[in-house]
Structures are given as structure tokens and as C-alpha cells.
Image (cartoon, helix red, strand yellow):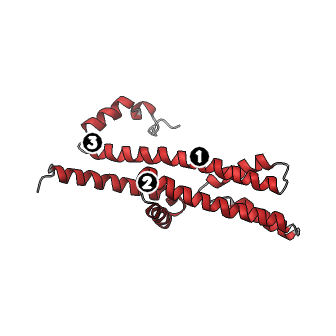
Amino acid sequence: MNEKEPNILNTKEIEVTLEQITDWKKENVFRMEIKAVSDSLYRLIHVYFKIEALILVINSILCIIALLIIKNPYAVVLGILIGIVDMLPVFGTGTVLLPWALFELVNKNVTSAAVLVSAYVVTYFVREIMESKCLGDKTGIPPFVMLMVIFLGIMIYGIMGFILGPVSYCIMKALILHLKIEIERGTLKNT
């Protein structure tokens, strides 16, 4: 590094302690808004990962059962791996099960192909119902609204909208509810 070039990543200059962040939150003009948004996001993240873990377990078990039905010797390992692939936003169980079903169909193993397609359909609906219903119930968002938020998030943000859609919705909802409370208390001043 040249002596004339400034050290951009000087850790002593940008070091921030948790105490400084806490003090900033207490002294900030928007502390109530920050608290409302952070509480809402914490609740969403906490619930989201619990629901995703539950969906992972259920879909892995369903895939293991399907693979046991077709007598696959690696049913448990493959079922768990398919469940993990299902957790990824872009991929799903269809990424593995549908090409596998097509391969089985080409090899004239219709029963195995039907079992794999059936497993895909069941795991797909488990994911859709669990995400919209459970996530919606735990966060106070109706299931249809949750589906719309995810869909709009994907339209607006692209693939990351699957996560950013509900996050944006929770931020807006928290701020609107905070504003409603302030209006009802009469603490907003007319300017």
C-alpha cells in the first residue's frame, strides 16, 4: 500500500460498540419509530425461521417416504437434501423431483415417476399453505395478503422479493400502526 493512499478500512475509526448503538437509539428523534420497526422485524425474522425449519422437516419426511416407496437405498439422505434444496428461495423440491420423475418415465418406470410427481405436488402445497397460513397467522398478516406480499415482493425486488416483500410490508405496517397510535393519543401537532 502506498503511503499517500488513505487507509479506508481503518477499524479503529469505524469501530462501534453496542453501547454506542444503544445510546444512539435512546437519543434519536425517531426512537419510537425505530423501536416499532425493529420489534416488527424481529418478530418476522423469528417466526420466519421457525416456519422454514418446520417446512424443512415436513417436506424432508415426505420426500423420505416417497423415496422409500420407490425403494431408493439412500432415501433418508436424499430426502433431507431435497428438503434443504426446498428451503432455497429459487429452488424447490421440483428442482430435484421433476427431472428425476422424467428420468424414471424415460426408463419406463411409471410407478416411480408417479410417486415422485405426487411427492412434488404434496411438498409444493405444504410449502405454500404453511408459508402463507402459518407465517401469516404468527405475524398477524392474513394468508391471502401474505401470498400477495410475496408475489409483489418478487415482482418489485426480483428473486430476493421472496424475503424482502414481507420485510417491506412489516416495516410499512409497523410505521402505519405507530402513526395511528400517535394520532389516537393526540400527540401529533398540527403544523
User: As shown in the figure, which amino acid type bears the numbered disc 1?
Assistant: Ala
* Quadrant of the rendered image containing residue 114: bottom right
User: As shown in the figure, which amino acid type bears the numbered disc 2?
Assistant: Val
- Label 1 SS: helix
Mark 1 crowd level (few <14, some 14–19, many ≥20, 10 Å Cα): some
Q: Which residue is mark 1?
A: 53
Q: Which residue is mark 3?
A: 31
- In this view, the residue in front, 74 or 160, is 74
Q: Which residue is mark 2?
A: 167
Q: Name the disc covering residue 79, or none.
A: none
Q: CA distance from mark 1 to mark 3?
A: 33 Å
Mark 1 vs mark 3: in front? 1
Q: Residue at x 47, y 37 (%)?
A: 9
Q: How many marks?
A: 3
**x, y (%) of residue 3?**
47, 35
- Label 2 SS: helix
Q: Residue at x 66, y 50 (%)?
A: 84
* Mark positioned earlier in the residue sequence (2 or 1): 1
* Quadrant of the rendered image containing residue 17: top left
**Rendered view: 147 above or below 2:** below
Q: CA distance from mark 2 to mark 1?
A: 19 Å
**x, y (%) of residue 56?**
63, 49
Q: Residue at x 59, y 57 (%)?
A: 127
**Rendered view: 47 above or below 66:** above
